[in-house]
Amino acid sequence: MEKFSRWRDQGTGIQPFLPPVPAVEDHSPAEKALGVILMIVKPITGLVKMALVAVVGVVYFILESIGLVLSPLGPIHRIYHRFVTAVLLRLVLVLLGFFWIKTEVVTLKRGRAASNKAHSGSRTVSGQMIVSNWSSYIDILYLAFRYDPVFTQIYPETLTVRQISLWQALRLSGSYPELAPEAGVETLPLLEFTKAMHKKGAGPVVVFPEGTTTNNRAILKFVPIFKDWQVPETSIDIRILTLKYDYRKFAPTFTVGLDNSYRLGHLFRTCAQFVNTLSVKSLNPEESPSNSNFSAMEGLSSTPQAAAAGIIEPVDEDALGSVILNLMGRITRYRKLGLNVRDKADFLDYFILRNNGISAKKTQKAPASTSSQRPKRH
């Protein structure tokens, strides 16, 4: 849309914030007839599956409440929680149409396949950090089902993070990004936080360095959350993960979730799909920037040939962030953009003003002591 053209990346022409619009296609009479049938069937399917998702959610809440009794038993409680989370969230993903999720350990070195050691080393443990792109609340459901991790919220103004619950992580997907923590909210630098979670045995830590969701067409410029880290950073085991959605008409990506009407509407449309597709790729642990043999030259090159020639991508103040961003781009073959989380906040400001579906009360900005502060959106 032309009215949102100011948030089109100048270098690539990609608009990463608007929900994807399917291309117009010519259909045969048979396809048009099928389309009419689907217009009748899909709403019914969506309502039934949404109801089932709600039931599973209630069951999850009840079982988690019962599990609190096991809290003093430590390891037993973690096993119970892991089992309940894995089973019920996988069931939710099935109801959302993700019957099969393709996972793959990839290598970026030419002529080399991921070894058995790499596959065995891909298992996550407490103290490990998972760095991922972020496009939807479905990312959260998958990561919770697969790893039962500690989710984090990044604050770009302070370059710190805080721990958030699964429910909070789901609500943050598509929401207005909070650039700074509210008064009284305790945050920590990411490295210190990750080491603290390791001491507690709390599970792997998930970080979304883009700081907000995109439409899964490119990767935003990272918040410089790794600014003071080394390359390689051997004190933490870093795992790089990418999630990619394939679709024709409806995209499971979720970029605008300013209130419950947006969230429920998108959930309904996702449930109405018969099949959705998600593929997950993780980088070979032997090529991770936490490996002591990691080469910064290779990590900052766009191809193995460029590394051999000494050609590297530009590096900003966050060297490790630049390395991870480049590796993520090579895994997904997505373009790396100059836009960032602050641009997403500006986009949502404009989106709210242009959209009559959100009340005027929600468009009013809260008083701010500095120009960097923005209204909080839920």
Image (spheres, rainbow, N blue to C red):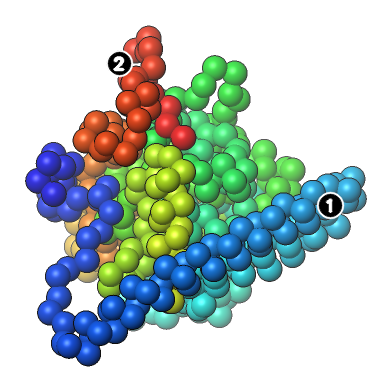
Residue identifier under label 1: 66
Mark 2–mark 1 distance (CA, rounded to whole Å): 46 Å
Q: Secondary structure at mark 2?
A: loop
Q: In the rendered image of this protein, does residue 376 appear above or below residue 319?
A: above
Q: Secondary structure at mark 1?
A: helix
Horizontal side of residue 347 vs 66, given as left or right: left
Residue identifier under label 2: 371
Horizontal side of residue 106 vs 358, given as left or right: right
Q: In the rendered image of this protein, does residue 302 appear above or below residue 174?
A: below
Name the kind of residue labelled 2 in the image. Answer: Ser
x, y (%) of residue 243? 41, 63
Horizontal side of residue 1 vs 19, given as left or right: left
Determine contact: label 2, label 1, CB under 8 Å. no
Q: Quadrant of residue 95?
A: bottom right
Q: Would residue 347 be seen by someone viewing this image from the given angle? A: no
x, y (%) of residue 31? 23, 85
Q: Residue at x 25, y 50 (%)?
A: 18
x, y (%) of residue 234? 54, 49
Q: Give whichever of 38, 160 is nearer the camera.
A: 38
**Discs 2/1, front:** 1
Q: Quadrant of residue 332?
A: bottom left
Which is nearer the N-term, disc 2 or disc 1?
1
What label sits on residue 310 in the rendered view?
none
x, y (%) of residue 109? 35, 72
Name the kind of residue labelled 1 in the image. Answer: Ile
Q: Would residue 112 be seen by someone viewing this image from the given angle? A: yes
Q: In the rendered image of this protein, does residue 347 appear above or below residue 297?
A: above
| Residue reaching furthest to the top | 369
Q: Residue at x 47, y 67 (%)?
A: 46
